[in-house]
Image: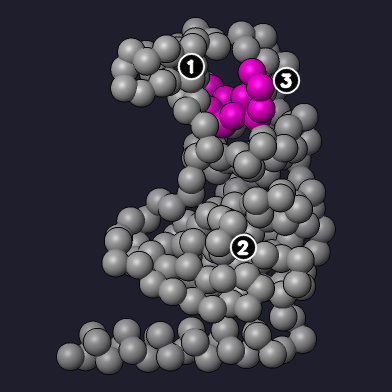
Amino acid sequence: ASGLAVAAVAVVGLVAALDALRGGPEALPPEVRGELVYSDPDCRRHAVRLPDLARRDFLTVGCGVFTRRDNLGVRDGEVAWFAYPVPGGTTTLLRNPDVREVAWLGSRRFAAALAGGSLTIWEGDRLLRVVARGSYRGLRASPTGRYFAGIGEAGLAVFDAKGRRLDLPEGHAVAWSPDERFAAVAGPSEVAIVPAGGGDPVARIPLSVADLDWQRG
């Protein structure tokens, strides 16, 4: 019973915070549209509609909610588009046993985290650039591959498709709007909505999230 009471208080607090944001000076600009789907710290799933912040809850549970928009992956040292059901026409782009994770950046280009500590960009089997040194995980890309991100030793790092580091707020997860104009960055107690190429937040939504995705809604 006490647990239910605590949960109820938390929900009331969240609703009040969202209501305050709706009418406050930091209300979202009308061009910020779609739906933020997110998991809370207990891995329960919810969604907030933009820009009016109407919330809905899901019965499903899961911490990871970010949606990949391609079939690019790594298996047995091969970076390939995997068509399912197997065999289904798998297309191999690169054979390199050091590749640990990848994120698609459009056409044959992709970002790859390598064993030994480097974040790289490739065009098929041709190395284009070493973006950063250090261990990276959780690679993800924007809908068309204009931007990508990974979690490094210093936290979330976001880059454009040429490998330039972008000035986005600190956080632990990021998702991009369907038109790639904005990014949502999850911090400890809020989600900051910022221009995708970097800059000051256009709004801050008081949400504690484990992961998030930005869908058309």
32 sits to left or right of 113? right
Q: Tell me which label, 3 or 2, sits earlier in the chain.
A: 2
- Whether the magenta-drawn stretch holds residue 104 is answered as yes
10 sits to left or right of 93? left
The image shows a total of numbered marks equal to 3
Residue at 44%, 74% (x, y): give it: 56
Q: Is residue 189 visible?
A: no
Residue at 56%, 71% (x, y): give it: 49
- On the image, numbered disc 3 is attached to which residue? 129
Q: Closest to the observer: 29 or 157?
A: 29
Residue 40 place in picture, x, y as percent: 41, 67
The circle drawn on residue 80 is: 1
Q: In the figure, residue 125 lies in which quadrant? A: top right
Q: Tell me which label, 2 or 1, sits earlier in the chain.
A: 2
Choose mark 2 or mark 1, whichever is in front.
Answer: 2
Residue 2 place in picture, x, y as percent: 21, 91
Q: Compared with residue 89, is residue 143 higher up or lower down, i.e. above or below?
A: below
- On the image, numbered disc 2 is attached to which residue? 34
Bin the neighbour count of mark 3 within 10 Å (Cα to Cα): few under 14, some 14-19, many 20 and up: some
Residue numbers of the magenta segment: 102-115
Q: Tell me which label, 1 or 3, sits earlier in the chain.
A: 1
